[in-house]
Amino acid sequence: MKRTSRKPSNLSESLQRHLNVYALAAIAAGVGTAQAKVIYTKTDKRIPAGGYHLTLNKNGVPDFTIYWNFNGYGYMLIEPSKKEHSNMVVGGALYSNRSHHKFDSYAAYALSSGASVGESAKFQPKHSVMYERIFSCTPNGSVCTVGQWFRTGSKYLGLMFHIKGAVHYGWARISWYPNHSSCGNQVFKGGCYKVTGYAYESVAGQSIMTGQTEDDVRPEPSSLGALAAGVAGRNERK
């Protein structure tokens, strides 16, 4: 059988010029080669009264510290590292669960699995209350709880932190265990809190989903990356 040779169709000079511009822009921005990757750490560590230092990228410098005081009525809060005050937590205004009174502080949200943590999320500066038990916070003097983390089971903190000055997004899973055997000798009314996993996106500015543990490798954005690769290949063949 006789084979026919096909010649690639020639693009117009104007279209070729525009494609070259897009390709150069993509290469300059690094979108043709940038790959997002989830860095996940599985752990099972109790949060002590003195604080748990959370280091998402394991560089030896804490990004956040989680404090839990189980004496008296108790409280739990998270604050950024003193060396990186611009680290933040997804959260909002702090209200009581009974009177809906607004407090002059911030609350760290207890997020469910699958929540997006990225540029569009609402982050709070400085320290954020996870929960606090307050005596006589209502007119009749009853105890109320502020914050979303009081005996919540397993929920997620949405985190924004920095690596070499660049913004990265991540999450940490915090679990309440009512079982004495899971908590060693540190027990508050039969239970304790643990950090049971955390993760972050390796590419600066790339969002992450809470609970996401697998690598998610892809060009960013795919259309411009593919265009850059295609045009670069075409130019090499000329």
Image (tube, rainbow, N blue to C red):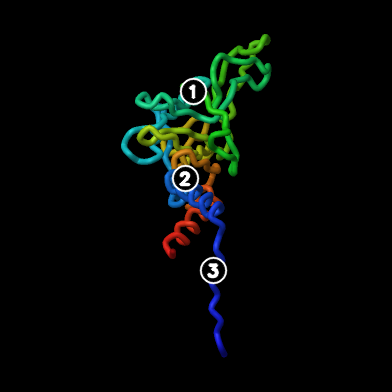
Measuring from the top left, give residue 218's x and y in whole percent: 50, 53
Give whichever of 226, 158 is nearer the camera: 226
The residue that appears at 47% across and 47% down in the rendered structure is: 26
The number of numbered discs placed on residues in the rendered structure image is 3
Q: Residues within 10 Å of mark 1 (few under 14, many from 20)?
A: some
Q: Is residue 64 above or below residue 229?
A: above
Measuring from the top left, give residue 113's x and y in whole percent: 58, 43
Viewer-side label of 3, 1: 3
Q: Amino acid at mark 1?
A: Pro
The numbered mark, 1 or 2, whose residue comes first in the sequence reads 2
Quickly name the residue at label 3. 8
Determine whether label 3 and label 1 are within 8 Å by CB: no
Give whichever of 67, 128 is nearer the camera: 128
The residue that appears at 47% across and 52% down in the rendered structure is: 215
The residue that appears at 62% across and 15% down in the rendered structure is: 102
Judged from the image, the secondary structure of the residue bearing numbered disc 2 is helix
Measuring from the top left, give residue 193's x and y in whole percent: 49, 35
Q: Amino acid at mark 2?
A: Ala
Quickly name the residue at label 1. 125
Judged from the image, the secondary structure of the residue bearing numbered disc 3 is loop
The residue that appears at 45% across and 61% down in the rendered structure is: 233
